[in-house]
Image: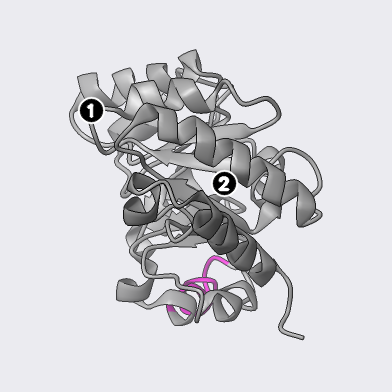
């Protein structure tokens, strides 16, 4: 049993700008998700908007539950890591909240094994080296869709171009150090299907309830899906 339906995974990334967000207060998660869904619709994104919640604090489960209350949004759970019991619990949390994908910062064979227990969830395995691309090709196939993290540190578009020499059919969601200034460079690189960004949910603005400014950031980032005028 595969851990990723490649065609389905690519469709999830058709949005090209994938928010990777976390919240200190669960009620903020619902408000933000509602705003993002509105702006995604206004930006002309076809299908349901896609969002990744980063499971990095004690509020993650409650935040995911709040986000799941927003109709018409496809959710994924990120930062899946840790020992076997924790990885399995995180996948279970994703399944319980109808998440369609899961994301790891780096990926081991144990994580691949656990992912097979959840066939309705597509795994985007975290990679930063050729060895991890080799493992993805082994576990998923030569056309695997992987996460590159931390993209800006490990080589960004240049690394993707280099690794696609031996693995020409692997495609990428690049996260980590992708900014408004370089998003279009990433998206113009063959093989990079999408970028993940936390810029659309800055902690400071959310804590202060500056939702109009948050909306502006979302709108500005979504506009980067398109080539520069």
Residue 14 vertical placement versus 101 (above, below) = below
Q: Residue at x 56, y 38 (%)?
A: 33
Q: Position of residue 64 (x, y in %)?
A: 44, 26
Marks 2,1: beta carbons within 8 A: no
Q: Is any atom of residue 32 visible in this view?
A: yes
- The image's colour scheme reads one colour
Picture quarter with the C terminus: bottom right
Q: Residue furthest left?
A: 83
Q: Quadrant of residue 35 in the image?
A: top right
Name the secondary structure under disc 1: loop
Q: Which residue is drawn at 73% across and 38% down?
A: 48
Q: How many labels does the image show?
A: 2
- Horizontal side, residue 172 vs residue 207: left or right: right
Residue 211 vertical placement versus 114 (above, below) = below
Q: Position of residue 219 (x, y in %)?
A: 64, 61
Q: Where is residue 135 in the image (x, y as percent from the top left)?
A: 40, 49
- Horizontal side, residue 199 vs residue 84: left or right: right
Asked whether 212 or 57 is in front, the reply is 212
* Res 58 label: 1
Marks 2 and 1 sit apart, C-alpha to C-alpha, by 35 Å
For label 1, count other residues whose C-alpha is less than 10 Å away and answer few (under 14), some (14-19) or many (20+): few
Q: Where is residue 49 in the image (x, y as percent from the top left)?
A: 67, 42
The tag earlier along the polypeptide, 2 or 1, is 1
Residue at the disc numbered 2: 141
Q: Which residue lies furthest to the top in this view?
A: 96
The magenta-colored residue range is 159-167
Q: Residue at x 29, y 37 (%)?
A: 24
Q: Quadrant of residue 217 in the image?
A: bottom right
Q: Is any atom of residue 194 visible in this view?
A: no
Picture quarter with the N terminus: top right
């Amino acid at each position: 049993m595969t851990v990723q339906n490649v065609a389905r995974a690519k469709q999830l990334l058709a949005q090209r700008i994938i928010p990777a967000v976390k919240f200190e207060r669960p009620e903020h998660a619902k408000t933000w998700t509602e705003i993002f869904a509105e702006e995604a619709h206004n930006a002309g994104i076809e299908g349901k908007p896609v969002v990744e919640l980063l499971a990095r604090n004690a509020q993650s489960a409650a935040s995911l539950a709040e986000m799941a209350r927003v109709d018409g949004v496809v959710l994924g759970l990120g930062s899946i890591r840790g020992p076997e019991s924790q990885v399995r619990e995180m996948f279970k949390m994703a399944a319980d909240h109808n998440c369609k994908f899961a994301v790891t910062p780096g990926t081991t064979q144990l994580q691949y094994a656990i992912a097979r227990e959840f066939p309705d969830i597509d795994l985007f395995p975290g990679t930063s080296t050729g060895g991890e691309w080799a493992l993805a090709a082994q576990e998923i196939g030569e056309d695997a869709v992987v996460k590159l993290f931390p993209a800006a540190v490990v080589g960004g578009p240049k690394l993707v171009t280099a690794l696609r020499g031996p693995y020409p059919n692997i495609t990428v969601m690049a996260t980590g150090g992708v900014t408004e200034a370089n998003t279009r460079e990433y998206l113009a690189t063959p093989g990079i299907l999408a970028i993940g960004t936390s810029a659309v949910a800055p902690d400071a603005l959310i804590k202060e309830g500056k939702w109009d400014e948050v909306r502006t950031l979302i709108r500005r980032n979504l506009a980067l899906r398109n080539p520069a005028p």
